[in-house]
Amino acid sequence: MCAIVGVYGSEDAAKIAYYALFAMQHRGQESTGLSSADGDRIHLIKKRGLVTDVFDEEALSLLTGSCAIGHNRYSTAGKDSVLDAQPVFAKYKLGEISVAHNGNLVNKYEVRNELIDKGAIFQTGMDTENIVHLIAKSQEDKLIDRIKDMLTKIEGAYCLAIQSRSKMFVVRDRFGIRPLSLGKLKNGGWMVASETCAFDLVGAEFVRDVEPGEMLIFEEGQEPKSEKIFEADYHPCAFEYIYFARPDSIIDGKTVYNMRLEMGKQLAKETPTEIDLVLPVPDSGVAAAKGYADGLCVPFEMGIVRNHYVGRTFIEPTQEIRDLKVKLKLSPIKDMIKGKRVAIVDDSLVRGTTSKQIVRMLKDLGATEVHMRIASPEIKFPCRYGIDTATSQELISYSQTPEEIAAYIGADSLGFLSIEGLKESLGNDRKYSLVSFDGNYFAGGNADSPSCSNCD
Ligand code: AMP
């Protein structure tokens, strides 16, 4: 998860970056940060909390300069640290530098241990610090060459925005696992963001996606320069379409909402059932449920109401608290459900907590049948490329069949989208990253690697 933004060549760089982070709040709520560069120095503000909590007019007024980069951090439950906010700032031989990173480096421990052996000290658990150290230690004279040097030493998923006092460098890994797009501002400046919904909010025009393996270099008075650093081996993350990205974002030319509708329609073909009503798990299952209902020609109703004010106050150390959290968040409309055969659609099933709670709620309200439908395949493998999925043991589909899970969650039936069906929905024009479903760790890292406690 996580979101990054970079703005270059605009008087209002920090303000624009702030609105971009606001638009991408769904990608991370743990902490947020912005750094700006005014030619002489870099200014940084970062803190735990939501974008609107951390920044106000006064804070933004301190972030002067025509270049700003920013980050929203997503953190695994219980592993958030006040220090782990980004961008990561440092002073080094060539001056000042600030780095924002979305993704997950799969060789972070090897690199870190090597750096520590050579005397490096670290302030946080984030793999982003490896990047800063590698740049600082490089023997190259120019920053751009130091960045290229660093890129030969890191592996995995990354989208990077790197800022010096006067330039900005943007890099996407050769697999293009996480999304990153380039936009043009109305006042002539440039912008990159994890999702295109950020462009829509600030009125920037979408130019194109940053290519996998590409570096963009922004310098004063010049058009952005593009350099191909690595041969592309494009594997965009299917989970961005399934769950992470905002439905109005466009990734690789495909609107996320439309992809979710397709997944729902495909699910209807693969797991049809006699029902009276289709309900989504809000908000994550809405588009897929609409597709499922359309596919079966059955009424679609927003029959489960979501309370949007349940924040992240409830850290989830135990199963009991997780159960309560679902109840606090979701509540069904009673009249709609009594005496009906209902299908509920969610985008994914991880531990089964959400599904179990919802099935129980609907049965308690008198639904005669409850059929659970999941608009993605069974999640059997942890992803090491920046998705916070648990260890194999915590993934219910790792050890249980759909029939066993249906019994566990109390549903009359349970149906998943097949891997082939997912590929069909997304379009067979790409090799998607499907690690969570097929365990193909094409970019290094595997299910048994240490977990992502210090990722993104
Ligand atoms: P669970 O209740 O453990 O089965 O989790 C399934 C729910 O979590 C679904 O409603 C998904 O929308 C949501 N979900 C899936 N992946 C993630 C993730 N990486 N982080 C947070 N929530 C997720």
Image (tube, rainbow, N blue to C red):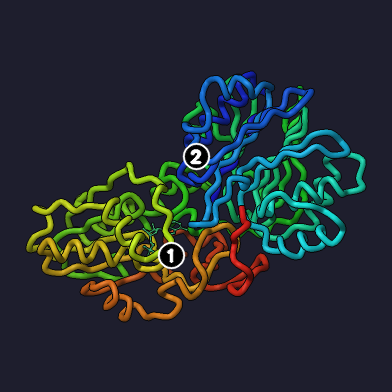
Residue picked out by circle 1? 422
Residue picked out by circle 2? 49
Within 8 Å: ligand 1 and the Cβ of disc 2?
no
At 64% from the left and 24% from the top, the residue drawn is 63
- Which amino acid is tagged 1? Leu
Q: Residues within 10 Å of mark 2 (few under 14, many from 20)?
A: many
- Which amino acid is tagged 2? Gly
Q: Counting residues from the N terminus, which is met first, the one under dot 1 or under dot 2?
A: 2
Residue 345: image quadrant is bottom left
The percent coordinates of residue 304 (x first, y second) are 22, 52
Camera-side residue: 42 or 419?
Answer: 42
Describe residue 259's horizontal placement relative to residue 54 as left or right. Answer: left
Q: Are marks 1 and 2 in contact (CB under 8 Å)?
A: no
Q: Classify 46 as above or below 232.
A: above
- Mark 1: which secondary structure? helix
Q: Classify 23 as above or below 302.
A: above
Q: Residue 224 — which label?
A: none
At 55% from the left and 73% from the top, the residue drawn is 439
Q: How many marks?
A: 2
Within 8 Å: ligand 1 and the Cβ of disc 1?
no
Q: Classify 249 as above or below 204.
A: below
At 52% from the left and 42% from the top, the residue drawn is 195
Question: Does residue 194 show up?
Answer: no
